[in-house]
Amino acid sequence: MHGVAPSKLTPPALPRDLVPRPALREALDGGAGRALTLVCAPAGFGKSLLLADWVKRSPGIPAAWVSLDEDDADPRLLWSSVLAALRACPAVPPSSRLHRLVVSRTTVELDFIDDLLDGLAALPQPLRLILDDAYHLRNGRALDELRLLVRGRGPLVHLVVASRLDPALPLARLRLDDELCELRAEQLRFTVGESAALVERNGVRLDARQCGQLHARTGGWVAGLRFAARAMRRHPDPVQFLAAFSGDERAVADYLVGEVLAGTTDLQREVLRRTSVADPVPAAMAVELCGREDAADVLDSLARDLGLVTTTGPNRTDYRVEELLRSHLLGDLHRYGADHVTSLHRRAARWCDREGRPADALRHAGQTGDAALVTNLLRGRVAELVARGEHAALSAALAALDNDTATASWRAALTACLHLERGDGRATAEAVRHARSLDTVPEPDLAVLLTTTERLAGVDRRAPGPEPAPDDPALRALARAGRGAARVATGAPGPARTELEAALDDARRLDLPFLEVLCLCMLGAAAWAGGDLREAARAAATATAAAREGGWEGTGWAAAANAVAGLTALEQARPDAALDAADAGLRAGPADLDPVVRFALRTVRGGALFDRGEKASGLLELQQARADVSEHRVPVALAAVAALLEYRIALQLGYATAAAGTASRLGGRPAARAERRLVRAWSEAAGGAFHAARVTVAPLLHPAARPAWPGTVVEACLVASHTALHCGDRPAARQALRAALDRGRELDVVRPFTLAPSGVRSLIVDELAGGDDRSHFAARVLAAPHCACRSGTELLTAREHDVLSRLPSLLNLDEIAEDLAVSVNTVKSHVRSIYDKLGAGTRRAAVLAAHEHGLLWLRSRPSPSLGGRRADEVMQARSGSG
């Protein structure tokens, strides 16, 4: 038998900076019992080190290791190496016939292969046979005999083949029969976490952003990461090194030339160089860049024979090269001259434009430094790029137009579009104004784009009139969405939804994902403003999912979708969901989030906190939200809902001054006349003037009433029901409640019912017996959790409420008894009961707890006795001040 060097039979030594990869070791374990485990990836992906680590960490399973080289294409040398590795393996006992096998010096006969397979089948325990660098076995007899080994290796042999290329084995059949376990380049690439671990093991400290940059630069290619980590360890400024790290780095370039590019022809290298300007490069673009009809065939051969190129795309007709190799090739290309590179980018830009790839066309055009080329591409494609959300390409185009006075208006327009993506209305408006100041008579399509951008940003709040439709389909869809946005802003939710639904259909038909997100966000807002909470919730959820899928979850549009979802959940009496939506929007939104969107989110948060029992926190959140938006124009429906929330909570907590201030702010909005009436009715009912409240709220029950937000009618019907009960008109109370239930069911509004007084809620119980839609909604209303502001109102009896209402004064117990015309012992009994129910030990603690439970707001009117004097007058008299 031929002599075999010990180095061929020994796994490579593991480096000190080895990063453990337990998931891949587990995948290798899963190959046991299958015909073949294949580890296949180009050079530098850590195949050998992974297998060596796997062997070392599994001492219980013996392994026979063979490192193949070019000589092993000779079957005699191949099987001599395999036999030597098996004989050195502890799983092969001295009695095994494998120790007696001899490889012929002239040729390997089939009898030898049969004897080898018989010896493997007779082994007393499992073993792993690892053939590393099997790409050296290109063709011929050695591969034919390896196929026999794959088929007949026996159940105890776990055969593992590592190669840069797919070996000429029946892989497709093995895959179909589930007899193939394979690890490819995509699985062998380091994750961001593994990249960070490798850098740290080399004593280099990088933050998360820098680790992400290094990972992106190398594409998770293990060899490139190791080169970078070790170089940074020696570099005086690792961060500076990272910024300049590329395939032109000396050690990397040497490895790429000596290992990765070894064996390529001059033609192959030229094709790789010329196509390195694009990533990925489609087959037809390769032909354009190289000026050769066979360019794609050359790339195919590089993918098939050397593994230097990988195919990608829906039909596997696009080609990709590892990022570090591509940067090396691009650096090599630059050595031919900048004009050569510019010419290739210009070819790529024109090809992409012809093929309907505007983002790629702009990226390549930006590399040429030709402002005229960039502007010409923008004229025909900017609307499509904006609507698709290709804002990286727009940013590149903006950089390419820098300091070119002839394209200043286009630069300003692009800036406005980029601000629009982030949802920054103020910055968008400034950029649009700047664009118009530069060009008093802009190109028609540019003028439409500027107007549309203003409308989508919520800046232009004028109702749109008749306008000619642009010829460009993408610009036409954008303009339609802009008109819908303007109608939302002017309080016309019905026409707005018509425009936006048509724009949404266009966006989906034309594959414009960013426009789809915009339309869904604004549809949700229009549906909420129109009182269609079911549609609002659906649109908001779809918008949130689309924003996440498109990578816009950190923009103002995603925050706006969360605001709609939160407002809807709040009115549906789902405070936990409302709070989650508000917090998600505030957390993910940009620092320059539109003030109105932030106001909506904080309004939701305040209402949800109150409904969950955090009363003071909820009111404070609402007050701060209002203060922060005082200089901005808030849509009337949102302003009305926020004011009603704040007023009712302030009234519930007994903060009369705060409630009055909120009511006065509603007075400044003519469109909120219905809400002003509702507030007045609430105040009158709280003061015991039930007849006056009934008269005040009556106009809101008329079908012609036009509240700022449709849910106001539900609140008005409930006030009418409550006041009718107190006026002894039970039929009218029942009729008003039924109107509230019918309207609430139509709108999907539940929260007002959870705030209704107990008398009204008892009427709701009577509606359960109907068996119709109203009764089903009544059951849902009663099943909803009561808002926290009501939870304490039924703790106390009516007489205990009377006693409690006097505890905040300076009246002593005797004076309270005199005021109520009961004995002092009765008052003492009530006080003890109040303390016990509120968990208080002192009068002051009981008053604080009563405020927290919202028990004192109904008693904020004057005391009926004490000679008609108010409680505060008694307090002044006792203190000697009046």
Image: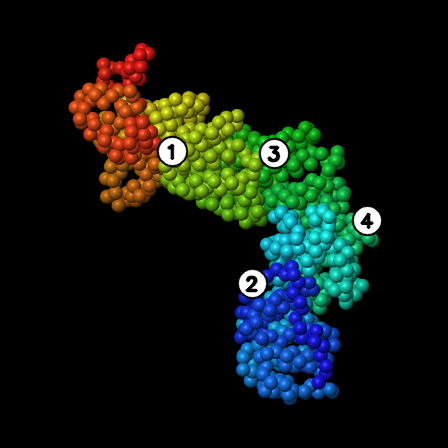
Count of numbered circles in the view: 4
Using the numbered discs, state the Cα–Cα distance from disc 1 to disc 2 in whole angstroms. 50 Å
State the residue in front, 763 or 734: 763
Q: Which residue is mark 4?
A: 339
Mark 4 secondary-structure assignment = helix
**Alpha carbon distance from label 1 to label 3:** 38 Å
The foreground one among 777 and 664 is 664
Could you tell me if the residues under marks 2 and 4 are in contact, i.e. CB atoms within 8 Å?
no
Residues under numbered marks 4 and 1 in contact, where contact means CB atoms less than 8 Å apart: no
Q: Amino acid at mark 3?
A: Thr
User: CA separation, marks 2 and 3?
Assistant: 49 Å
Residue at the spot x=55%, y=42% of the render?
554
- Closer to the observer: label 1 or label 3? 1
| Placement of 442 over or under 191, stated as above or below | above
Instruction: Report the Cα–Cα distance between label 3 and label 4.
Output: 37 Å
User: In the rendered image, is residue 277 in sight?
Assistant: yes
Which tag, 2 or 3, sits closer to the chain's start? Answer: 2
Residue 22's tag is 2
Name which residue type carries label 4.
Asp
Residue under pointer 1: 615
Q: Is the residue under label 4 in contact with that under label 3 (CB below 8 Å)?
A: no
Secondary element type, mark 2? helix
Q: Earlier in the sequence, mark 4 or mark 1?
A: 4
SS assignment at label 3: helix
Front residue (pair 226, 382):
226
Q: Please state which of the two labelled residues, at mark 2 or mark 3, is closer to the viewer.
A: 2
Q: Position of residue 536 (x, y in %)?
A: 44, 41
Which label was assigned to residue 774? none
- Residue at 62% x, 39% y is 418
